[in-house]
Amino acid sequence: MRRVVCTEWGEPEKLVLEDSPDPEPGPGQAVVEVAAAGVNFVDALFVAGTYQIKVPPPFTPGSELAGTVLAVGDGVTDIGVGDRVLSSLGLGAFASHVVVPAGSLTLIPDNLSSPAAAALAQSYCTAWFALTRRTTIKAGETVLVLGAGGGVGLASIDVARHLGARVIAAASSADKLADATAMGAIATIAYEDEDLKVRARELADGQLDVVIDPVGGHHSEAALRALGPGGRLVVIGFAAGDIPSLRTNLVLLNNRSVVGVDWGAWAMRSPAEQSALLTEILDGVAAGELHPPAPSERPLTEAGAVLRDLLERRLRGKTVLVP
């Protein structure tokens, strides 16, 4: 097997590719031949050693994958050889073969490609958790999605649209806004060139109900100010790099709320609830109600370059590494 290895914390360009013996499954485990591994912001944080959970090198990054089961260990009955599966595993996905607990594998619907499945879990679970667990979207509400051209942004548009919301997309480039429109946004804001607060209020006819914010930085306060009475700012992450300091008087005004979303920690603490959440998403995909976009594909050898592009915000939507 081939795998990407972080030998020391630091820049993603320091990642190396190694050959290792193919893994064998132990009791309760399965070996998956990886068709694609999703690339996420958290992967770059693990490599840099700046994530809240610090993993000592050496380790193989990569937190989600899709592929085909090659072998199963003793006691495995729910998954069989030849099954197409996806998994969220925290670390280890940037490889050609992975051994994982069989219980962490989920069958992929027939209408979902393996690359799209590899890019689905983190983005769609985050969006679904945010909009059905941490807050609840009502049909007819207006939702503003920041970072709308990224993986979480596009998933949030898809989920909010499915739940009956009107979606306004905000992003940094025309290409990303075009992707957001294709996903179902009814209006867009180029927030590097337009006044985010003013345009959001105009497009929402004065009643902006929810802001999805995976970006942070200086856009967060403008988005908070744009919220109407009872509006909710849903904080997902800080892709811009800067964690904003928000004035609490802006929360008090109009009875606004700020809601934190840490899907990953919740999923680890609540595996049964996470399994149910993922089933809801995959049922929606199978029924044609959710539409995960096809990700960009790059070879496993370019793992470091892809993480750099992610950090520099050059990627559109989701990207997967293909062994």
Image: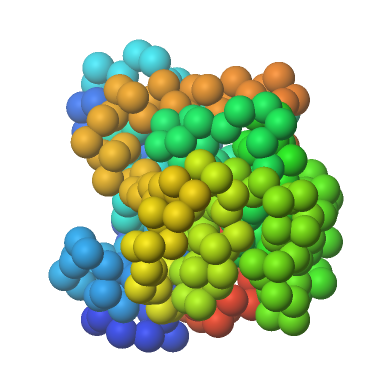
Q: Where is residue 164 drawn, in percent x and y?
A: 70, 29
Q: Residue at x 32, y 55 (%)?
A: 91
Please determine whether, in this image, residue 82 is positioned above or below residue 44. Answer: above
Residue 108 visible (yes or no): no
Q: Where is residue 78 drawn, in percent x and y?
A: 39, 15
Q: Residue at x 28, y 29 (%)?
A: 271
- Whether residue 27 sits left or right of residue 315 in the image: it is left
Q: Residue 140, located in which quarter of the rendered image?
A: top right
Residue 188 visible (yes or no): yes
- Whether residue 2 sits left or right of residue 143 in the image: it is left
Question: Which quarter of the rendered picture does the N terminus lie within?
Answer: bottom left
Q: Residue at x 80, y 69 (%)?
A: 175
Please determine whether, in this image, residue 71 is positioned above or below residue 167. Answer: above
Q: How many marks?
A: 0
Tell me how the rendering is colored. rainbow
Q: Where is residue 291 drawn, in percent x and y?
A: 72, 37
Q: Residue at x 65, y 67 (%)?
A: 197
